[in-house]
Protein backbone atom coordinates (compact mmCIF):
# COMPACT_ATOMS: atom_id res chain seq x y z
CA UNK A 1 0.00 0.00 0.00
CA UNK A 2 1.45 3.41 -0.98
CA UNK A 3 2.35 5.91 1.72
CA UNK A 4 0.09 9.01 1.87
CA UNK A 5 2.34 11.97 2.56
CA UNK A 6 2.05 15.71 2.05
CA UNK A 7 3.63 15.80 -1.43
CA UNK A 8 1.43 12.91 -2.56
CA UNK A 9 -1.70 14.80 -1.45
CA UNK A 10 -0.56 17.92 -3.32
CA UNK A 11 0.01 15.86 -6.50
CA UNK A 12 -3.45 14.28 -6.14
CA UNK A 13 -5.09 17.68 -5.69
CA UNK A 14 -3.30 19.04 -8.77
CA UNK A 15 -4.43 16.05 -10.84
CA UNK A 16 -8.05 16.48 -9.69
CA UNK A 17 -7.96 20.21 -10.53
CA UNK A 18 -6.32 19.62 -13.92
CA UNK A 19 -9.47 18.49 -15.69
CA UNK A 20 -11.66 21.50 -14.75
CA UNK A 21 -8.76 23.86 -15.47
CA UNK A 22 -8.22 22.25 -18.90
CA UNK A 23 -11.92 22.65 -19.66
CA UNK A 24 -11.89 26.34 -18.65
CA UNK A 25 -8.76 27.01 -20.73
CA UNK A 26 -10.22 25.40 -23.85
CA UNK A 27 -13.51 27.26 -23.44
CA UNK A 28 -11.68 30.50 -22.73
CA UNK A 29 -9.19 30.23 -25.59
CA UNK A 30 -11.61 29.03 -28.26
CA UNK A 31 -13.61 31.47 -30.31
CA UNK A 32 -12.82 34.95 -31.46
CA UNK A 33 -10.87 37.63 -29.63
CA UNK A 34 -14.12 39.38 -28.68
CA UNK A 35 -15.46 36.18 -27.10
CA UNK A 36 -12.22 35.69 -25.16
CA UNK A 37 -12.39 39.29 -23.96
CA UNK A 38 -16.01 38.83 -22.79
CA UNK A 39 -15.08 35.57 -21.03
CA UNK A 40 -12.12 37.26 -19.32
CA UNK A 41 -14.31 40.18 -18.27
CA UNK A 42 -16.92 37.74 -16.90
CA UNK A 43 -14.29 35.95 -14.81
CA UNK A 44 -12.92 39.25 -13.50
CA UNK A 45 -16.44 40.49 -12.66
CA UNK A 46 -17.20 37.25 -10.80
CA UNK A 47 -13.94 37.57 -8.85
CA UNK A 48 -14.65 41.23 -8.01
CA UNK A 49 -18.19 40.42 -6.86
CA UNK A 50 -16.96 37.57 -4.68
CA UNK A 51 -14.19 39.73 -3.25
CA UNK A 52 -16.64 42.54 -2.41
CA UNK A 53 -19.25 40.30 -0.84
CA UNK A 54 -17.66 37.19 0.66
CA UNK A 55 -14.04 38.24 1.16
CA UNK A 56 -14.76 41.74 2.49
CA UNK A 57 -14.27 42.20 6.24
CA UNK A 58 -16.64 45.20 6.34
CA UNK A 59 -19.51 43.15 4.93
CA UNK A 60 -18.93 40.43 7.54
CA UNK A 61 -18.79 42.99 10.36
CA UNK A 62 -22.05 44.57 9.16
CA UNK A 63 -23.70 41.15 8.97
CA UNK A 64 -22.56 40.26 12.50
CA UNK A 65 -23.75 43.64 13.81
CA UNK A 66 -27.15 43.13 12.21
CA UNK A 67 -27.50 39.83 14.08
CA UNK A 68 -26.17 41.06 17.43
CA UNK A 69 -29.38 42.83 18.59
CA UNK A 70 -31.32 39.62 17.92
CA UNK A 71 -29.07 37.51 20.16
CA UNK A 72 -29.94 37.44 23.85
CA UNK A 73 -27.22 38.97 25.99
CA UNK A 74 -26.43 38.07 29.57
CA UNK A 75 -28.40 40.30 31.92
CA UNK A 76 -30.70 41.62 29.19
CA UNK A 77 -33.58 39.46 30.42
CA UNK A 78 -33.39 41.10 33.84
CA UNK A 79 -33.43 44.58 32.32
CA UNK A 80 -36.43 43.71 30.13
CA UNK A 81 -38.23 42.28 33.15
CA UNK A 82 -37.52 45.45 35.17
CA UNK A 83 -38.77 47.59 32.29
CA UNK A 84 -41.93 45.48 32.07
CA UNK A 85 -42.49 45.87 35.81
CA UNK A 86 -42.10 49.68 35.46
CA UNK A 87 -44.47 49.93 32.50
CA UNK A 88 -47.26 47.78 33.93
CA UNK A 89 -48.05 50.01 36.93
CA UNK A 90 -48.19 53.07 34.63
CA UNK A 91 -50.67 51.30 32.36
CA UNK A 92 -52.76 50.37 35.39
CA UNK A 93 -52.63 53.97 36.65
CA UNK A 94 -53.77 55.18 33.23
CA UNK A 95 -56.97 53.14 33.50
CA UNK A 96 -57.90 54.29 36.99
CA UNK A 97 -56.29 55.21 40.31
CA UNK A 98 -57.04 56.76 43.67
CA UNK A 99 -54.24 59.35 43.39
CA UNK A 100 -56.05 61.46 40.80
CA UNK A 101 -53.34 60.95 38.18
CA UNK A 102 -54.17 61.22 34.47
CA UNK A 103 -57.51 62.99 34.85
CA UNK A 104 -58.91 60.31 37.15
CA UNK A 105 -60.34 62.56 39.86
CA UNK A 106 -63.28 60.99 41.65
CA UNK A 107 -64.51 64.38 42.87
CA UNK A 108 -66.73 66.26 40.40
CA UNK A 109 -65.10 69.56 39.47
CA UNK A 110 -67.70 72.17 38.75
CA UNK A 111 -67.62 74.85 37.51
CA UNK A 112 -64.87 74.19 35.00
CA UNK A 113 -62.17 76.92 34.98
CA UNK A 114 -62.27 79.21 31.94
CA UNK A 115 -58.78 78.31 30.75
CA UNK A 116 -59.77 74.61 30.45
CA UNK A 117 -61.18 74.81 26.93
CA UNK A 118 -62.59 71.31 26.37
CA UNK A 119 -65.21 69.23 28.18
CA UNK A 120 -65.63 65.54 28.83
CA UNK A 121 -67.34 63.91 25.85
CA UNK A 122 -66.00 66.30 23.22
CA UNK A 123 -64.29 64.84 20.17
CA UNK A 124 -60.80 66.29 19.62
CA UNK A 125 -57.99 65.78 17.14
CA UNK A 126 -54.38 65.51 18.28
CA UNK A 127 -52.47 67.91 16.01
CA UNK A 128 -49.11 66.10 15.83
CA UNK A 129 -50.26 62.61 14.76
CA UNK A 130 -53.78 63.59 13.60
CA UNK A 131 -55.48 61.04 15.84
CA UNK A 132 -59.15 61.57 16.70
CA UNK A 133 -60.35 60.74 20.21
CA UNK A 134 -62.91 61.44 22.91
CA UNK A 135 -62.08 63.30 26.13
CA UNK A 136 -62.84 61.14 29.17
CA UNK A 137 -61.14 63.27 31.86
CA UNK A 138 -59.21 66.47 32.45
CA UNK A 139 -56.86 68.14 34.93
CA UNK A 140 -56.23 71.85 35.50
CA UNK A 141 -52.51 71.10 35.25
CA UNK A 142 -50.18 68.16 34.79
CA UNK A 143 -50.99 65.41 37.31
CA UNK A 144 -48.82 62.39 36.58
CA UNK A 145 -46.48 60.18 38.63
CA UNK A 146 -42.73 60.86 38.48
CA UNK A 147 -42.12 57.53 36.70
CA UNK A 148 -44.28 58.70 33.78
CA UNK A 149 -42.37 61.99 33.56
CA UNK A 150 -39.06 60.10 33.51
CA UNK A 151 -40.35 57.82 30.77
CA UNK A 152 -41.41 60.84 28.70
CA UNK A 153 -37.92 62.39 29.22
CA UNK A 154 -39.21 65.88 29.93
CA UNK A 155 -36.68 68.50 31.02
CA UNK A 156 -37.27 70.49 34.21
CA UNK A 157 -38.32 73.59 32.26
CA UNK A 158 -40.80 71.55 30.23
CA UNK A 159 -42.27 70.08 33.41
CA UNK A 160 -42.66 73.56 34.95
CA UNK A 161 -44.45 74.76 31.81
CA UNK A 162 -46.68 71.67 31.65
CA UNK A 163 -47.67 71.93 35.33
CA UNK A 164 -49.73 75.02 34.48
CA UNK A 165 -51.20 73.66 31.22
CA UNK A 166 -54.54 71.80 31.30
CA UNK A 167 -54.20 68.12 30.42
CA UNK A 168 -56.82 65.73 29.08
CA UNK A 169 -57.24 61.99 29.29
CA UNK A 170 -58.33 60.92 25.81
CA UNK A 171 -59.63 57.64 24.47
CA UNK A 172 -58.31 56.90 20.96
CA UNK A 173 -59.22 54.11 18.58
CA UNK A 174 -56.42 51.55 18.35
CA UNK A 175 -54.82 49.87 15.35
CA UNK A 176 -57.64 47.36 15.00
CA UNK A 177 -61.37 48.02 15.54
CA UNK A 178 -61.57 46.23 18.88
CA UNK A 179 -58.60 47.97 20.54
CA UNK A 180 -58.43 51.30 22.34
CA UNK A 181 -55.53 53.54 23.32
CA UNK A 182 -55.48 56.01 26.20
CA UNK A 183 -53.52 59.23 25.99
CA UNK A 184 -52.78 62.02 28.46
CA UNK A 185 -52.08 65.14 26.43
CA UNK A 186 -51.66 68.87 27.06
CA UNK A 187 -54.25 71.31 25.77
CA UNK A 188 -51.88 72.94 23.27
CA UNK A 189 -51.70 69.80 21.07
CA UNK A 190 -55.49 69.35 20.84
CA UNK A 191 -58.12 70.90 18.59
CA UNK A 192 -61.87 70.55 18.83
CA UNK A 193 -63.20 68.31 16.06
CA UNK A 194 -66.19 70.44 15.02
CA UNK A 195 -69.62 68.89 14.54
CA UNK A 196 -69.09 65.73 16.63
CA UNK A 197 -70.00 64.86 20.21
Image (spheres, helix red, strand yellow):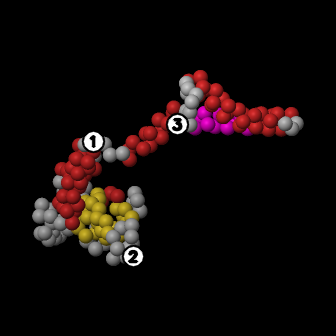
For the residues labelled 2 and 3, the Cα–Cα distance comes to 57 Å
* Count of numbered circles on the image: 3
Q: Quadrant of residue 121?
A: bottom left
| Circle 1 crowding by C-alpha within 10 Å: few under 14, some 14–19, many from 20 | few
Where on the picture, by quarter, is residue 14?
Answer: top right
- Outermost residue on the right side: it is 32
Q: Dot 1 lies on which element?
A: loop
Q: Earlier in the sequence, mark 2 or mark 3?
A: 3
Q: Mark 1 and mark 2 in contact (Cβ < 8 Å)?
A: no
For the residues bearing labels 2 and 3, Cβ distance under 8 angstroms = no
Q: Which residue is mark 1?
A: 74
Answer left or right for 193 relative to 45.
left
Q: What is the crowding at mark 3: few (fewer than 14 residues within 10 Å), some, or many (at least 20)?
A: few
Measured as percent of width and height from the top left, residue 106 is found at 13, 69
- Between 176 and 188, the residue placed more toward the observer is 176
Q: Residue at label 2?
A: 195
Task: Measuring from the top left, give residue 147's x and y in whole percent.
Answer: 20, 50
User: Which quadrant holds the C terminus?
Assistant: bottom left
Q: Is residue 47 magenta?
A: yes
Looking at the rendered image, the disc whose residue lies closer to the viewer, 2 or 1, is: 1
Q: Disc 3 on helix, strand or loop?
A: helix
Residue wearing tag 3: 59
Q: From which residue to which does the magenta span run?
A: 41-53
Residue 129 falls left or right of residue 19: left
Tell which residue pokes out farthest to the front in this image. Answer: 1
Whole-percent x and y of residue 39?
77, 37
Give the residue displayed 44% in from the left and 43% down from the top. 66
Amino acid sequence: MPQVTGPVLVQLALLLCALPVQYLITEWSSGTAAQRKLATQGILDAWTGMRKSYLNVTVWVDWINSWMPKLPLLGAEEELERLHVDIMPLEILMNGNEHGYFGASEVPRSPRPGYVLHRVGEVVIETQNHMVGVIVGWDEGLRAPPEWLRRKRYTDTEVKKLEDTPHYKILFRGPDPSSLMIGYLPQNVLQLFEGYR
